[in-house]
Each structure stands twice: as C-alpha cells, then as structure tokens.
Image (tube, helix red, strand yellow):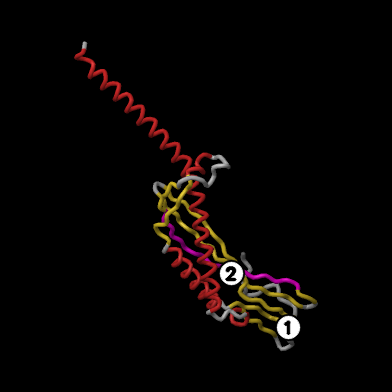
Amino acid sequence: MNYYRPYGRAKKYIFFAVCLLSVSVTLFLLIDARLRPMIRSTAAVQAQSYAAVAAGTDIPSILTGTDTGYGSLVSIKRDADGNIVSIETDAMQINLLKSKINSAVAKNLSGLSAKELGIPIGSLTGLALLNGRGPKISTVISITGSAQTSFFDSFDDAGINQTRHQLFLKTTATMLIVFPGETVTAAYTYTTLVAETIIVGEVPEMYAGITQK
C-alpha cells in the first residue's frame, strides 16, 4: 500500500494546483473586468485634459500672431447710397487659420505616447469610502490625436438699424487612446470668439458668409 502513497499525494498536489490556478484566473478576470472601465473613463478624462491644454495654448497663440481683425476676415461692400450689398468672408485667410490651428493642436497631441496611468486599488471595490485610496495599479497608455477646425458666425440686434456680427471658431480634437488589449476614443471641443463688429445698416438676407455651427 505504501507504494501508491506518493501517487496519491501527487494527485492531491495537482488538484490543489489546479484549484489555485482556477481561483487565480477567476480573480484576475474579475479584477480586469472591474479595471478596464475605469481605465477607459480615466484615460478619456486625461486625454481631454491634454487636449484642453493644447488648444488653450496653441489657438490663442496663433490668433495673437495672425491678423484676425474683423476687416482682415470680413469685407462689407456698399452701393453708392451706402446700403449694404454684400458681406464676404476671406476664405483664404480662414483656411490658413484652420490649417495652422489643426497642425499645431495635432502636433501637440502626437507627443503624448507612453503616459503612465494609475488606478487606486480601493476604487476597484466600488465602495465610496475606499474610492481613490490604496496602492495604484499602473498601466501605460498611448495617446495620438487630430484636430478639425470650423468657423461659424452670428448676427444679433444691437440697436436701431444696427447689427452685431460675431465670427467664432470651433476646434474639435479627436484622440485615440491605446492601452493593453483595447483602444478607445475621446473628443474635446474648444470654441472662441475671433472677431466682431457693429454693422450700421440693413444686413442682406443672403451673403457669402459662414453660418454653420
């Protein structure tokens, strides 16, 4: 009988090893399932923060260094009696601004590879008391981005026979966030007033402007 005991012990060890492996795999899968949504949301917020800094730095700098006065972007033409016959935007100047802004923001976002992201262990429990507490589980994320800029304008009543014309730009940064086993996207939109003026006289209903938002 003693001859078979080592074999019986080996079976026990194998059984315990299989149980331990099963428990470990199950625990890993549970942690992974709990961790991934947090990584997604945290990475998206982090990426939006980077985009906000990029847009908030690059766009004002470009606008300051470029002639964006109302007269440089918009031309108001009148007839011999002073009536407004057309309001035209300078498409070349606007497209140049778009190109500069898109390139600057995208370049800033393209340098965000290999960023470390940490999720506190306490946040995995789902308990408010432990949220944000404990050692952090770290992962590395990579962020790349592109930007798309558009212009839109608005006309508002500014008094008797007066109209306020405002020209805005809207830049949307779209970011691709890559971390082990998954890819997610996030977006951030920056809107700012570029130029404005008070137009005296009746504004024609049709004009060569930009009204889309």
Identify the mark at residue 12; answer none if there is no mark: none
- Magenta segment includes 208: no
Residue placed most toward the observer, 104 or 116: 116
Magenta residues, as a range?
Answer: 141-157
Q: Circle 1 sits on which residue?
A: 83
Identify the mark at residue 169; answer none if there is no mark: 2
Main SS type for the magenta part?
strand
Q: Is residue 50 left or right of residue 83?
A: left
Q: Position of residue 110 (x, y in %)?
A: 42, 63
- Magenta segment includes 143: yes
Image quarter (top left, top right, bottom left or bottom right) of the C terminus: bottom right
Spatial CA distance of label 1 from label 2 is: 28 Å
Q: Position of residue 54 (x, y in %)?
A: 50, 66
Report the residue at 54% width, 78% height from top: 93
Q: Is residue 91 above or below residue 41?
A: below
The quadrant in which residue 69 appears is bottom right
User: Label 2 amino acid?
Assistant: Leu
Tag nearer the camera, 1 or 2 = 2
Q: Position of residue 170 (x, y in %)?
A: 58, 66
Q: Is residue 52 left or right of residue 88?
A: left
Sequence order check, earlier mark of 1 and 2: 1
Q: Residues within 10 Å of mark 1 (few under 14, many from 20)?
A: some
Image quarter (top left, top right, bottom left or bottom right) of the N terminus: top left
User: Label 1 amino acid?
Assistant: Asn
Report the residue at 38% width, 34% height from top: 25
Q: Is residue 197 above or below residue 128?
A: below
